[in-house]
Amino acid sequence: MQIPSSERADVVATDRDITDWPGVVGDLNRLLRLRTTPIAMKRFESVEAMEAVPRIRRPGAIHTTDQIVGQACRNGWTVGITADDLVGAQCSTVIGLHPRSADWLSGKHMAGVWFKDVAGAAAHQRSMDVAPHGHYRALAVSPLASGRLDPPDIALVYATPAQMILFINGLQWSGYKKLEWGCVGESACADSWGRALKTGEPSLSIPCFAERRYGGVMEDELLMALPPSFLPKVIAGLESLSRNGLRYPIAPYGVNTDARAGMGVSYGSG
């Protein structure tokens, strides 16, 4: 099961309980001008507990997890699913609703399509970060500001590269830690929500073909998935950076301009 970030020595996060979800989202929008709705993701031990979430929708068709996430962040819906609502094990395994079975690990369904041969496809499957199986039977997503999934397991924030690097700078403002991520290529949801659910750490991804084709992710968007306990720290860091003149949008300085005046403000004269 996910280890709370407050109990891990190698993860720097806040120990504050978040009660004002609209305020958190409002601060992110004010500081980064996000154009896509930040959302919450939460797993449930029973279908009944998931279906008890206020104003929850249940799919009337078979979807990818990318589509379910897209319905929350693009449409503003609160949606609950089980493994039966998803198109296959590739989706349900990442969120812990299906085991890493021998068939799934074989990668044979991706050989000759995304990878040259079965060996490469199987190596890809083994490299994916996925939530542990066996604890949960259902999952829901919802706009973070709604507070309907209180508290969520993780929050998902879509942002442009310029917005995202400032988000990361805010995370690193205090208690600095170098952040390192990987890229599995296709099935990049394993790099974002799969890894965040598995490790409890901020997890950045370059959304893959399926996320963009089925989930509506824009071509210039990156995705950060992280436990919500990190968000007050990110916001506090962004506020401090903003007071130093380091804010979004990042105004172009000019490629032919004498850099000394600007560098003296942003990086010091040394």
Image (spheres, rainbow, N blue to C red):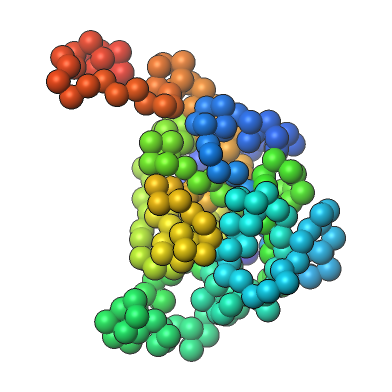
- Residue at image position (55%, 72%) is 91
Image coords of residue 262 (percent x, y): 26, 15
Q: Nearer the viewer, residue 204 or 158?
A: 158
- Residue at image position (43%, 27%) is 248
Labels in figure, total:
0
Quadrant assignment, res 47: bottom right
Quadrant assignment, res 115: bottom left
Image coords of residue 234 (percent x, y): 52, 34
Q: Is residue 270 visible?
A: no
Image coords of residue 16 (percent x, y): 66, 35
Q: Residue furthest top?
A: 261
Q: Which quadrant does the C terminus fall into? A: top left
Q: Nearer the viewer, residue 36 or 155?
A: 36
- Residue at image position (49%, 54%) is 217
Q: Which quadrant does the N terminus fall into? A: bottom right
- Residue at image position (60%, 58%) is 69
Image coords of residue 175 (percent x, y): 45, 33
Q: Is residue 35 above or below residue 31?
A: below
Q: Is 158 situated left or right of 59 in this image?
A: left
Q: Is residue 209 visible?
A: yes
Q: Is 250 situated left or right of 216 in this image?
A: left
